[in-house]
């Protein structure tokens, strides 16, 4: 791929959705819906469960299902999937991080790391049931 000049198009405005892969959607629901309190948009059997995160969507797919070709010709989404741990970062203000740390610990979720970046932003890292790295961080991390 070459670096084409952006003369007739603008770069994407924001990230609309991100995907993680988890073969046990019941465990994913318990974590993302129960512990994290995310609003569930939909679940389709053992294929996927989707959550609202601010203006975006977190897609949790069972890789065994999404690696198969699409079954509905009206929705010809290409097959996809990933193996091994992925990563997602969820933004929250600094004053909420300590309350979240306590909530996660009370839910039996191990804190993998909790530190402050050189720019002053704090991050807390945990693992979801599939081993994906879930970071809770202050938005100023990328300011």
Image (cartoon, rainbow, N blue to C red):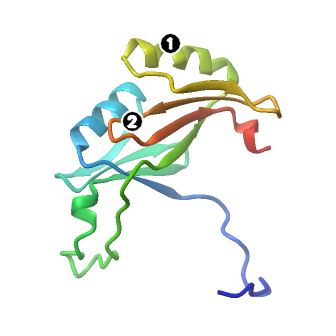
Quadrant where the N terminus is found in the figure:
bottom right
x and y, in percent, of residue 83 in the image: 36, 57
Which of pointers 1 and 2 indicates the residue nearer the eye? Answer: 2
Vertical placement of residue 56 versus 34, above or below: below
Q: Which residue is mark 1?
A: 102
Vertical placement of residue 102 versus 33, above or below: above
Residue at horizontal 39 percent and vertical 45 percent from the top: 51
Classify residue 32 by image quadrant. Answer: top left
Quadrant where the C terminus is found in the figure:
top right
Spatial CA span between label 1 and label 2: 16 Å
Q: Which of 2 and 37 lies nearest the eye of the viewer? A: 2
Residue at horizontal 39 percent and vertical 36 percent from the top: 128
Q: Which residue is mark 2?
A: 128
Left or right relative to 91: residue 69 = left
Q: Which of 136 and 7 lies nearest the eye of the viewer? A: 136
Near mark 2 (Cα within 10 A), the count class, few <14, some 14-19 or many ≥20, is some
Near mark 1 (Cα within 10 A), the count class, few <14, some 14-19 or many ≥20, is few
Left or right relative to 51: residue 30 = left
x and y, in percent, of residue 31 in the image: 34, 31
Vertical placement of residue 85 versus 75, above or below: above
Vertical placement of residue 10 versus 129, above or below: below
């Amino acid at each position: 791929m070459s670096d084409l000049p952006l003369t007739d198009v603008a770069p994407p405005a924001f990230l609309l959705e991100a995907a993680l892969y988890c073969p046990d959607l019941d465990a994913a629901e318990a974590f993302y819906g129960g512990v994290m309190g995310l609003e569930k948009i939909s679940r389709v059997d053992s294929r996927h469960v989707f959550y609202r995160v601010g203006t975006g969507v977190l897609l949790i797919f069972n890789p065994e299902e999404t690696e198969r070709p699409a079954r509905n010709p009206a929705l010809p989404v290409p097959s996809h999937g990933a193996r091994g741990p992925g990563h997602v970062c969820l933004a929250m203000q600094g004053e909420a991080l300590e309350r979240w740390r306590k909530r996660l610990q009370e839910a039996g979720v191990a804190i993998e790391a909790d530190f402050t970046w050189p720019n002053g932003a704090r991050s807390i890292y945990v693992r979801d049931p599939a081993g994906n790295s879930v970071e809770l961080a202050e938005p100023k991390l990328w300011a």
